[in-house]
Every structure is written in structure tokens, then in C-alpha cells.
Amino acid sequence: MALFGFEKDTLLDLTVNIIPLGILFFFIVAFAVFPAFGTDPVFSGLQFALIISMFLLLAVLTYYAGKAVENAEKENDELGHEG
């Protein structure tokens, strides 16, 4: 089964980034539902800009890390190495 083009072993390797993505997503939703610092557009905008930018950057990093792991595994298999 390939989810997002990644095999099961690669997805297990990527859980170190998927868990923080879940935590960031939780805080995005939590701060949207319960504004901790009021509804000032400047502070709320800055807060969401920081959290969402970290979420997006980590998501992109996770995707490219997964692709790099997949390519490394393919190259390793083509050379006949185990590991």
C-alpha cells in the first residue's frame, strides 16, 4: 500500500515529522476555536502566520525527506545491498 507515493517503511521513518505536524495542526484549530490572546487582528494574524508557516514548511520538508528516503532505498536495492 502506498500512501502519498510512500511505502510503509518510509511512512514509519517519517512519523518523526508527522507527529509534530499533528501537534501544530491541533494548536491551529485550538487557537481558531478558543483565541488565547483575544481577537486583535495584528496579534492573531501574526500568531497564525507563525504557526501556519511552520506547519507548511515542516510538511514540505517531510515530503522531500520521504522522496529522498524512497530514492535512497531504490538505489540501494539496485546495487544489491541489504539494509
Image (cartoon, helix red, strand yellow):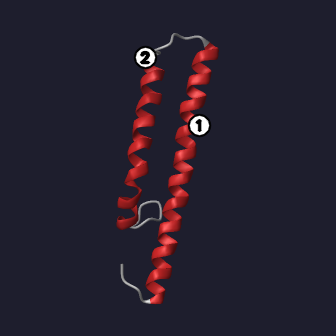
Identify residue type, mark 2.
Phe
Helix, strand or loop under label 1: helix
Task: Name the residue at 53% across, 32% down.
Answer: 51
Whether residue 75 sits left or right of residue 49 in the image: it is left
Query: Can you say whether 24 is above or below 82 in the image?
Result: above
The reply to whether residue 1 is visible in this rendering is no
Mark positioned earlier in the residue sequence (1 or 2): 2
Look at mark 1 in the image and give the residue it sits on. Answer: 53
Q: Residue furthest bottom?
A: 80
Q: Residue furthest right?
A: 42
Q: Nearer the viewer, mark 1 or mark 2?
A: 1
Q: Nearer the viewer, residue 55 or 82?
A: 82
Identify residue type, mark 1.
Ser
Coordinates of residue 82 in the picture (x, y in percent) = 36, 83
Coordinates of residue 3 in the picture (x, y in percent) = 42, 61
Residue density around tag 2, few if under 14, some if 14–19, many if 20 or more, within 10 Å: few
Helix, strand or loop under label 2: loop
Whether residue 26 sits left or right of residue 71 in the image: it is left
Query: Can you say whether 40 is above or below 57 in the image?
Result: above
Coordinates of residue 22 in the picture (x, y in percent) = 40, 40
Task: Name the residue at 38% across, 60% down.
Answer: 13
Task: Name the residue at 61% across, 21% down.
Answer: 45
Look at mark 2 in the image and give the residue it sits on. Answer: 34
Task: Name the residue at 56% across, 26% down.
Answer: 48
